[in-house]
Image: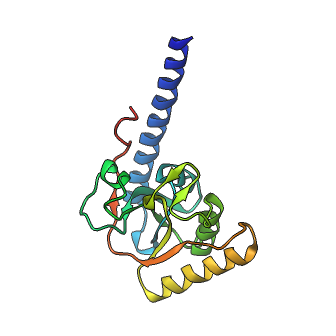
Amino acid sequence: MQNEKLFLTFDWFFTHFTLRLNRWNQQINNLRTMDNNNLEQITFGGGCFWCVESCFNMLKGVHSAISGYSGGHKDNPTYEEVCTGETGHAEVVQITFDPKIISYAQLMDVFFFLHDPTQLNRQGNDIGTQYRSVIYYKDDAEKAKAEEALKTSEASGKWSGTYVTEVTRFEKFWPARTVPSGIL
C-alpha cells in the first residue's frame, strides 16, 4: 500500500511537472511568434501563485502567466526567503495578454473569482503576507481600472465582507523557479 501511494504521488508530481514544462515551452514559442506591440501585462497576487498561474494559462488571449514575486525589498528573492514573510514580497502572477482577445476587466473578473479578496494575508491554509490579495498598476490609467474592478467586484456581493485587496504601484517582478524546492 505504501509503495502504491508513493508511486501515485510520484506519478502525480511527474505528470504535473511535465505539463508545466510543456506549457512553458508553448509560452516561449507563442512569445517568439506574436506581435509583441499589441500585448499588455498585468501583475497581481491572490494566494498561492502556482494555482493562480495554472488557471490563467488556460485562458484564450493569455500568452503567458508567470509566477514570481513583487512588492518586496530584496532583489531576486528565493521561494524559501519569501515564505519567511520577511522580504515583503507577495506571491504574484505576471500575465501577458492580448487585449483584442481578452480584456483587462475580464482578467480582473477571473482574478476575483479565483481567490477570496476578503481574507487578509492568507488564502485558505496559506497564511502570511506573501499570500495577500494585491493588484499592481504601472500608471494612473491602470490604477483607475484596478480600483474600478475592485469596486465592481465588491458591489457584486460574490464575497461577503470587506475587500482587503491592495492596489499598489508596480516596482519590479522577480520570476520564481519552475518548481518550489523540496517538491520534487
The location of residue 103, given as percent across then percent down, is 59, 73
**Quadrant housing residue 32:** bottom left
Q: Judge whether residue 139 can be spotted in this image.
A: yes
Q: Nearer the viewer, residue 54 or 115?
A: 115
The location of residue 114, given as percent across then percent down, is 62, 58
Q: Judge whether residue 102 can be spotted in this image.
A: no
Q: Is residue 22 left or right of residue 155?
A: left
Q: Is residue 24 left or right of residue 117?
A: left
In this picture, is 122 found above or below 51?
Answer: below
Outermost residue, right direction?
Answer: 157
- Residue placed at 50% from the left, 74% from the top? 166
In this picture, is 168 found above or below 8?
Answer: below
The C terminus - image quarter: top left
- Residue placed at 72% from the left, 78% from the top? 155
Outermost residue, bottom direction?
Answer: 140
The location of residue 29, given as percent across then percent down, is 40, 52
The N terminus - image quarter: top right
The location of residue 149, given as percent across then percent down, is 62, 78
**Quadrant housing residue 71:** bottom left
